[in-house]
Image: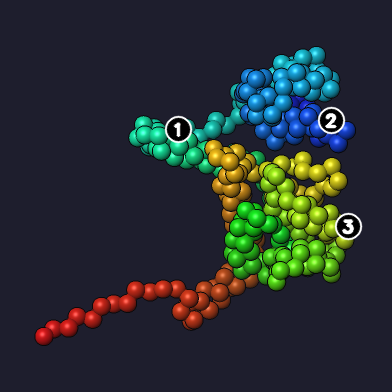
Amino acid sequence: MDPTLKNRTISNLKAILPDLSPRLRTVAKYIVDHPSDFGLDPIRETARKCGVSTYTLVRMAERSGFDSYDEMREPFRQALVSAVPVMERPGWIDSLHDSGDLGRVQAEASMNAMSIVQRSLERQDPARMSRVVQMLLEAENVYLTAVRASYAMAYYFHYVGRMALPTLQLIPRHMNSAIDELNHAGPGDVMIAISVTPYSRETIEACKFALARGVRLVMVSDSDVISSEFSAHETLVASVITTHHFGCFSGVMAVLETLLALLVDQGGAGARARIKSYEDLRKDNNAYWIAQKKTLVFG
C-alpha cells in the first residue's frame, strides 16, 4: 500500500470539490474533515454521518478514480494502524457511565471533549503554527472576527492575546459590521476568522472582503475546505464533533491556547512587559476581589 495514497486522495478531493454535485460535495468534505472516522467506520455508518445513501459513497469512489468504495477507503484504514491512538478511557469515565442515565450522558460528553482536544492538537503542524505566529507578529494590524458561538472564542483570544500582540483588534465593534472595520485594511494586515459548520455568512463575507483588500487570512475552523470562492493563507483545523446538537468547542479552544502560548513566547521581553503592565493596572484599580479579614472583638 502506497503510504502517500491517502494524502493524494485528500488533495484530489479538495481539487475537484467545486465541480461536484451537492451530495458528492458533502461526502468529499466529510472525508477531508474526518479521515480517521472514514477509515474506521463501515460504509453504512459513514453514509449515516454524511446524510447520504451508500450508493452516493460508491459514486464518490468512482468519481475519484477508484474501482470500488473499499479501494478508496483502504489507505485511510491503513493509516490508522500507525496513527497515535485516541486517549485511553480512564476509570472515572466508566464510573460515570455506570452511575445512571445522566452519568452516561456526562461520560460520553467528557470522553468526546478529551478526544477532540487530542485530535485537534495532533493536527497542528509546527511549521504552519510558526508561519502563523510570524504573520501575526509582523502585521501592521491584526483583525479578529467571529459571530455567535465562535464569538466567545474570539473574545477570549482577544482579551489575552492583546497583551502579547498589541496590534490585535476584535471586530466588529460598536454595532458595526466586520466589513465596516476593514474599510482601511490593506496588504500589511492580517485577519483571523473563527467559524465552524454551519459557517456564518457574515464571517465568510468578511473573509472575501479582506482578501480582496490584500489582507492575509488565517482561518480557525473545523475544515480547510470552507468555500470554493476563497482560500485562506493558513488554516488551523480543530475538531468540533459533539454528543449534542451544537458543536463542541473544546478543540478550538485548545488550538487557540496553543497559539497564545507561542505568541507570548515569541513576543519576548516586550510581551512580558505588557502582561505585567496589565496586571499592575488591575491591581492598582482593585480589579480583583480580595476577601476581607474579619476583626475579632474581645469583650
Q: Which secondary structure lies at badge 3? A: helix
Q: Is residue 169 left or right of residue 157?
A: right
Q: Amino acid at mark 3?
A: Ala
* Residue at image coords 47%, 32%: 88
Q: Which secondary structure lies at badge 1? A: loop
Q: Are marks 1 and 3 in contact (CB under 8 Å)?
A: no
Mark-to-mark CA distance, 1 and 3: 47 Å
Which residue occupies the extreme left position in the image?
A: 299
Q: Which secondary structure lies at badge 2? A: loop
Tell me where residue 213 sits by quadrant: bottom right
Q: Is residue 117 left or right of residue 231?
A: left
* Residue at image coords 84%, 30%: 21
Q: Which residue is mark 3?
A: 212
Whole-percent x, y for residue 4 in the image: 75, 26
Q: Is residue 65 above or below residue 245?
A: above
On the question of residue 264 being in view, the answer is: no
* Residue at image coords 60%, 38%: 241
Mark-to-mark CA distance, 2 and 1: 40 Å
Q: Residues within 10 Å of mark 2 (few under 14, many from 20)?
A: few
Mark-to-mark CA distance, 3 and 2: 28 Å
Q: Are marks 2 and 1 in contact (CB under 8 Å)?
A: no
Q: Amino acid at mark 2?
A: Ser
Reading the chain from its start, which is encountered first: label 2 or label 1? 2
Q: Which residue is mark 2?
A: 21
Number of numbered discs: 3
**Numbered disc in front, either 1 or 3:** 3
Which residue occupies the extreme bottom position in the image?
A: 299
Q: Which residue is mark 1?
A: 89
* Residue at image coords 63%, 41%: 239
Whole-percent x, y for residue 101 in the image: 40, 34
Q: Is residue 156 above or below residue 123?
A: below
